[in-house]
Structures are given as structure tokens and as C-alpha cells.
Image (spheres, rainbow, N blue to C red):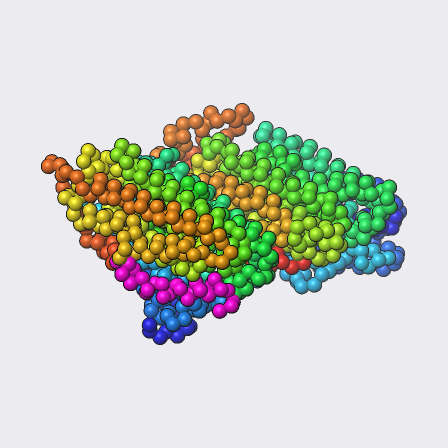
Amino acid sequence: MTVVAESAAQSAASAAHAVGHGAQAAYSVHAAPGSAYDAYATVASGTADTAAGLVQSIDWLAVAPPTLTAVTALVVLVADLFVPDRRKPLLGGAAIAGLLAALITLVPLRGDDRSTFCLTTDAGACSYTADRFTLVIQLLVLGGALLTALISLHESRKLPAGEYWFLLLASAAGAALLPASRDLATLVVALEVASLPAFALVGLRRGDRRSSEAALKFFLSSVTATAVTLLGVSFVYATTGTLHLGRIAGRLGEVPGPLTTLAAVGVALTLIGFAFKMAAAPFHFWVPDTYVGAPLPIAAYLSVVSKAVGFSGLILVAVVAFPSYGDVWGPVLAVLAALTMTVGNAGALRQSATRAWSAVRLLAWSSVAQAGYLLVPIAAAAYGTGAGTGAREAAGAGAGGLGGERIGSTVAYALMYAVVNLGAFAVAALVARTKPLNRLSDYRGLYARRPLAALALGFFLLCLAGLPPGIVGLFAKVTVFSTAVDAGLGWLAVVMAVNVVIALYYYLRWTAVLFQPAEEGAAPSPATPVPTTTPTPTTTPAPAPAAAPASITTPTPIPVMIAIALTAVAGLALSGAPQLVLRFANTSLF
Amino acid sequence: MIDISESVMQLLLALIVVGPLVGAVAALLPAPPGLRGTGPDQAVLRHGVTVTGAVLAAAIVLALGFDRDHPSRIQATTDISWIPALDVRIHLGIDGISLPLLVLTALLTFLCALYAYFKQRDRRRHAPTPNDATPADGPATTADSATTDAPAPADGPSSKAFVALLLLLESGMLATFAVLDLLLFFLAFEMVLIPMYFLIARWGGSEGVPGGRQAAAWKFILYTLLGSVVMLLGLLLIGLEAGTFDMVALATDNGRGLTTSVQVIAVLAIGLGLAVKTPMWPLHSWLPDAHTAAPTIGSVLLAGVLLKMGTYGFVRIVLPIAPDGMRTFAPYLAALAVSGIIYGSLACLALAKEGAGGDLKRLIAYSSVGHMGFVLLGIATMTPTGVNGALFANIAHGLITGLLFFVVGGVKDRYGTADLDTLAGATGAALYGRAPRLGGLLAFAAVASLGLPGLAGFWGEMLAMFGAFRPAAGLSRPAFLTFMVIAAFGTLLTAAYLLIVVRRVCMGAQAREAPHLPDVRNYEFAAWTPLAALTVLAGLWPAALLGLTDPAVQKLLAGGKS
């Protein structure tokens, strides 16, 4: 009971509670009301002297990144009530400032592992840990949110500003909390905090049928997945009697005989929720429609931050909590990885250039495929060196061992992917301003109109494809390949090799379009005769007529340009010195 | 020959690899005042000539400074840690095996840049020549080819992009021969793909290619990428098992740190990737289309250098690092190699036949399949003789086929087509009569290509077959004797189709009312003479080349033992 009580206290104190009412309520049902209340009150009042047994000192610096983000979210929400309409852009500025501040707090945390919200009875079991893994993922998540915010500064004028920024920041706070959580309850709360605002963000374009449809689709499938995860968590809790990941790892090995099936089922079910977030193959179907329906920056956000939430949760659960069941989830994840990349690439390959929103659709499918690559090292973490040498022994080396090193490749790949994918979305947002339909054919001749943006997009796409001059993409793929080869997953490496070739086709096709001469006629031209009759039954209240005549003189949106410049510079710097991200690949992050 | 300090050599080699890369970026920037020339096209093409010229000069100085007394020693080495996480080091260096290829690459690229520059200038000077009507090749025709697709926004970006891609390509090619790290080799191997794709897809011609130049470009890049990704798996396997990606250390180890099963898998994977690039017979199908569709310059570099990257990989990586695995596959490799020789010759014979509608460029492409078959046969023997022959044939093929593609490009420019039947008409194209020098050069290149003693093509094929006569210990001699006989038969077929081509293109009755055909222009002489001269030189004085390669090959085959 103490376990549950104090985890309720932690989540109360953590940033999560600010927004995660629903989810928190859901699980504080377990808590003994009295003790939870006590802990809550002490933390809230900040006096750590009363009720000595239950009260802990909190490492505020360690929890600062998610907390600052959450606080900013609240400030923006409240300020929205008092700020006059013409000053609304200030809210965006505040949000960006908050994210920057949260990023800065990561700096002093480098170097040493900090833990807080530990059990008073066992200082080793903590609910919040800021180790290297946490910091890297927080950097990824907060940086991704910052770039999303930059891309959306213009877009958000069409949306309710206060709600938009509040939801974005709240989701980012949840995403930043997730990699730090080291118990299943906090993990699920963080997952929900990251997800619930995302549903609202997807559906934020009021009066747009596609937007609401996308949000509903996203919501229903996501909630189902979360329910399954909760069921799995409860099974695991039933068999082990603890929620802390480290303790679960210890106790799962000695589950009494009759309960082993329950434990295995619990392990499998828990992973499903995270696989869904990551858009792994059987759970990917929501992706294309959701990306197209959502505002473009939110699609970018989902493709990077939501994915990061998925794979970091998966890593925590699989590698930290369930290492002894590596022979269960290892092969499953390997198959899932192969399936995901194949399905994603097949979907991307099918996008016709003239279909409406085909650029976003292609990015959506490509993000599914990339999730497949991200899964490969996690699957490899279940295996020892060479083919089939006892998964249990290798995993027994623990999270700090081989598995911990292997998942470094996922982290390195994710960092690369985040930079270039957000960059690609930023250019897409730029193009969408003049060509709202965002078809692939709209990118024709981009080099003639905006040479730098075209070069940047070409570079991003080649990074995603993993071909020079996108050197960082190439080496990120090499690390993923090397984990697969090292783990003896030769078949998976070959499947991935074939997929890399398939992916090159659509990435390079898009790249080639950028540099083709522009079509005759400036505006929506006769050269593409069937732009409006493409099979899109949903008639959008297209802002196209307004935008088209002004397309030549549309002013360049500065924040989007900054986002493109930032990602391009980061991509180039990483190509020159891939070590910057790859250094995570071969070291233990926990 | 001349004494240059090691640090200067290091710098030169680094310059050779990095220079074109910097040049490629510079080509995209607007020209600084004072270097604007007569127009943006001219300025940027001149920039290309300058950069490739500087690289060639550096390569020649490097060759002069190369210590010929110890060609087996890796010289001008640079070894800097780049990505510690993956154990990737920027390890550059040259020995007797890579130096000739490095110089060949620098030379061919320079000649290509020169050819492009003067061709564009020539085009501007004689604006209304008959050539302009035909969208042929080269950067100067970008405007032409663009008009067939869509109106070009401007000529500037196209020539800019052309030069930038050419330099990027050069950097990748040179890096392939200069790096001594497996992953860096892979990087360089991949670096040539994107530039070559764009050269074919945007500056190529669709004549005689099923599906057009786009399809040819796709075939080229997807095929080669699939091969090289599989190769990466093999490289990773070797690197992870042996604990290092350093080629020198691995070669010294000579496969002792790797079990035979690992070697077999690794050779299979790496060999597949290299065989696609080379190309080996059943995996060659990307090559004819790519060569036919590519612009002249693209064909020259594709045949002259890109194919060599595959065979170089066999010599540099497969032979010394995984000898046991290579021994397992050597008979199969040799069998496929001689199949390629026969297949290439038969395909050429079929194309050269009257009424077959054969394209000259496609014919030369198929002849490359045959010639690379000799190279692979030499490598498969695993003897110093055979490998030396393979390396010699590599260089010879680069020179001769480069020249052939240049000359055929010239013919295509003049006639507006490379279709053999259209060219030859009823009796023959009568190039001897209408443009005697052009005809003479074509005949010279064809004769060199068929392996006439005294020209470069002879020695490599002879040594390769000689190696097959007595293959390395552990390889079946009867099998290799059979391969040798088949390969010798292949030389006869080669001679047959090349002579048919010469008869149909160079000879024939000259029609009286035929329009005037310009003979070899000065700039064409400038670009082609070095190749012809080197072909003769290599044929008459093979020791110059073999003296460089032989000690290095001996050392590679023996591993750390010598």
C-alpha cells in the first residue's frame, strides 16, 4: 500500500498532475485516500518537515524540465483570458520562451544521474530518474516541441491561440516526464498526459470535418490501446506486487509457477500501448488520416514527439522492467519492426503525386517506416552477441548491459530522425502557405522559387533515405544495421536492407521533383489537369482561391524559416560530425 | 621519383579527396566578381575545369612523389578518428594498387570537365550548327533537353547543378580509392549514386532506352543501392567479428581472426554488392540502359571509373580480408565471369548485326560486361598473375572505353543518332571518307578494345587468362583451364563484333550529296589525345604499371606474412 500511496504523491508533485486529471483519478482509486492526501498536502505546501515518514525532499532541478513546461502551459492558459486579441501572438512567444527555459535546465543536469521520489523504505527504487537516457529523450522531446512551436507560430493564428499553446505545452510536459518515469503508474500517467492534449490538437481546426474525423479516429484507437496497457500493467502488478521498473525486473524472474502465464500476458499487453504510440505496424492505420487531418505542425509534432514517447516507453518497459522476458518480446518486436517498415514503405510508395495532401501522406507513411527502423535495436536488445546465444543470460546482464548499449542506436537514430523530419515538415509548412493542397507535384520547381528551402528539403529527404550527402542519415542506419548484425538478426537486417532501397525510391522521386523546371504558368496551372477532381470526397473549405493570386508575393514567414535553418544547420553539423549523435549508440544510457 | 615529404603527401591526398567536395559547394554559390566570365554557364563550367585540373595536378604530383621502391607500403597516410562510436576513422592512404586508379579517375574527370567546357563554348560560337537540333548530351544542351521537357527557368542553375554534381561524383570516386576504412569505403561507394542518378535522369538521352532515361536512372540507382546495402551487411559482419574496420589491419590479419563460416557469409554479401557494381553477368542488367541513357560524360565516368570501384573492392577487401570465403566462391565467380565474357560478346554481335537496330552506346556497354568478365576472372584465380592482370585490365578498360564513349558521343553529336542502322545506312557510314580523323580514332579505340598486342587492352586479358592457367592452390585446375579456354574464345568473339562495328561505321560508300561533317575539333583532340597516348604507352610499356601493382598484390595475397 505504501508503494501506491507514495506514487500518488509523486505524480501529484510532478508536472503531470497539472493536466492529467482524468488519468490520475483513474489510478488514485487504488490509493488509500488518507495517505495520498497527506503526501499531496505536504508537497503542495512545500514544507517538508511534517509527517516525516511520508515526506521526501524533492530534487527540484531534476524535475525542472517537465515542470517548467507544465507551468508555462498553465500560465499561457490563464493569460489567454486577459490578453486582448491583437496581443495573442505574445502567447506563442511565451510558449517558446518556456520551452527554451526547460531546455536550458537540461544543461546543469548533465554528468550525474539524479533520482527523486524514491521510496522511503528503499532508496534504490525511485519514480523519477534523470539519467543520460532521460536527458537525451527530454532534449529530443523539448527540442521537437520548440521546433513545432516555431513552425506553428503563423499557423496558430487560424486556431484558438490560448488553447493551442496550452495543449501543445501540456503534451510536451507529459512527453518530457515519460522518459524519466521509473514506475509503471507514472509511466502510464505520463503517456496519457502526452496523448490526451494531442487528441484535442488534432481536432482543433473547428468546422473542418477531416480534422474532427481524424481526432476521433486517433482518440478511439489510442484509448483502446491505453486500456490494454492498463490491463497489462495490472497483470504485472498482480504477479510482482510492485510498480517500480527496477523491482519488477528483479521479481519477474521469480514469479511462482501458476502465475507465469499471467506475467507473460501482462508483459505483452503492456507493450501494445507503446507500440501503438510509435505507430508500429498493426497499430499504424490511424497515422495517415490523422496526419492529414491535423494542422501541419501537429502532424510534425506527432511524427517526432509522439513517436519518441512511444519508443522511450517501450525501451523503459521492455529493457528496464522486463529484461528476463527478452525471449518473449525480442522476437515479437523483431517481427513487428520488419512488418512496420515494410508496411510503411509500401504505403509511401503508393502515394500518387497529384493526390491532395500527398506530401503529408507520404511523410506519414515514411514515419511509419522509420518507426520500423527505430524498433530494430530495441528488438536486438533482447539478444546476446551472435545468433541465439541464450537471451535470458544476456538480458540477465541487466539494463545497464548489452541491451542498454543496443538501445543507444535507437536513441541516436531518433535524434537524427527528429532533426530531419521536423525540417522536412517545416519546408512542407512553407510550401503549404502558397499551395494549400500540398501535393507532391506542388514541389515541382521549388528550387527555382526558393533555392535554399529546396536544397534543405532535398538534404532532409536524403538524410531520411540514408544516402550521401545525408551522411548522418547513412551512419544512423549503419548503427541500426550493426546492432541487428551483432545480435545475429541477419534476416531482419536483410529485410531492412530491402526496405532502405524501397524507401530511396520515393524519397529520391520527391527530391528530383524539387529540381525539375517549374511548370508553365505560375498559379494552379493547366499542366496538372486534375487537381481538384482527385478522389477526395471531403470538400474542404479551401482557402485556395484567396491564396493563389497572392502566391508570388506572400511574405516569407520568419519563424518557419528559422525552423528550417535550425534543422538544416543541425543536419549539416551532424553530417560533418556524426559522433554528436552516435556517441549515444555504443554506451549504456541507464 | 621526386622526394616529397610525407606530410606534404598527406595534404595532397586530403586535398584530392576534399577538394572536389569544396568545389561542388562553391559551384552552387554565385560567381565572385572577376570570375564571372562571359556568362553564368561559362563561368561555372570554367570553375569545374579549374577544380578538376587542380585535383589532377595534385594527383600527378602525388604519383611523382610516390615511393616506387616500396609500392606495397601504404603511403601518404592520414589516420584521424572520426566517429569513435562506430570506430570509423578517416584513414586515407595509397599504394601501388590504388594510385593508378586514383590518377585515372582524376584524369578522366578533368577531361570530362574540359570537354563540357569547350563544347559549350563551341556551341555558343557556332550557334546555328546542325547539332543544336538534336538534344544530345553535355551541359551545353541543357537548354535543348529542357525544352523537350518543359521550359527551363534559366540556363544558369542547370550548368551550376551539372558542375556541382560532377565534382561531387569525382569526390566520391576518388575517396573510394583513397580510403582504408570499411565504413568509409561504403560511404564513398554510396556517394557516387546521387550525382550519377541526376546526371542520367536530367542530362541523359532517351533514345534507344526502354522506358526512357528516367527509367534507366532508376534502374541504375535502385539496383546499385540494393547491392551496396547488402555489401554493408557483409562489411559490418567482418568489422564486428574482427573488432576493427581498418582495412590495413584486417588485410594484415589475412582472415585469421574470422571463422570460415563468417568469411563465407561476408564474402557472399560483399561480393553481391561489388558484383552488381562491376557488373558481373547475371547482375548486369542495369548497365546497358544506364550507359545508353547517360550523357557522354556520364558514360565515360560510369564505364571508366564506377565499374572499377567494384573490382577494386574485390582486390582490396575480399581477397585479403576473407581469403577462405573467397576460395569457396572463386570457381563460381570465375564461371560467372566467363559467362559474362561470352554473353557480352554475343549480345554485341547481335547488336552489331544489320537490321538489329543496335545502339552504339549500348553496344559498348555490353562490351564492358565482357571486359569486366576478364577482370573478374583474373581476380578469381587468386594468383598474383591473375590479380595483376585484373588491375591492368581495369586501367586499360578505363582508358579505352572512356575513349570509345567520347568518340561515339562525337559521332552521335554529328549524326544526331547512335543507332547503328541509321548511321550505316545501306553500305556503311563512311566515316573514313567524311571525317577521317574521327573514323581513325574510332578504329583505333575499337582495335585497342579487342586486345591487339601493343595496345593497353592486350596485357590485362592475357595475364588474366595466364592466371587461370595455373590458379592458386586449393582451386580446381581443370575447371579454371576450361574457363581459360572459354575466355580465349570470348576474345575471338570480341574481335568479331568490334571489326563489324568498324566496318559498318568507318567504311562504306560515301554518298555524294551527304552534308559536310566536321572532323575532330580541337577541343575534342585535347580531351581525347591523352587517352589515346596512354593506351599506346600502357601497351608498349606495361612494366610501368605492373611494377607498381605487383608488389602490392603480392603483399595483399600473402597478408601479414611477407
Residue B136: image location, x then y, percent: 28, 41
Query: Whole-percent x and y of residue B559?
Result: 50, 64
Q: Residue visible at 67% across and 39% down?
A: A276
Residue sitting at x 56%, y 56%: B238
Q: Is residue B558 magenta?
A: yes
Reply above or below: A430 against A411. above
Front position in the image: B146 or B166: B166
Q: How many marks?
A: 0
Q: Is residue A108 above or below residue A217?
A: below
Q: Residue at x 61, y 39 (%)?
A: A340
Q: Which residues are magenta?
A: B535-562
Q: Dividing the picture into quarters, in which one does residue B48 lie?
A: bottom left
Asked if residue A63 lies left or right of residue A527, the reply is right
Main SS of residues in magenta: helix
Q: Quadrant of the C terminus of chain A?
A: bottom right
Identify which residue, A81 or A249, lies in the foreground.
A249
Horizontal side of A590 relative to B560 (left or right) equals right
- Quick check: A470 above or below A356? below
Q: Is residue B161 magenta?
A: no
- Residue lying farthest to the left in this orientation: B512
Whether residue B80 is visible = no
Viewer-nearest residue: A189 or B450: B450
Name the one closer to the observer, A30 or A242: A242
Which x, y percent locates residue A40? Answer: 82, 50
Tell me which residue sits at (23%, 44%) in the image: B502
Residue farthest along the front direction in this orientation: B478
The reply, left or right, for residue B435 in relation to residue B188 is left
Left or right of A249: which side holds B380? left
Q: Is residue B471 visible in the rendered structure shown here? A: yes
**Where is residue A72 shown, x and y percent of the image?**
66, 50
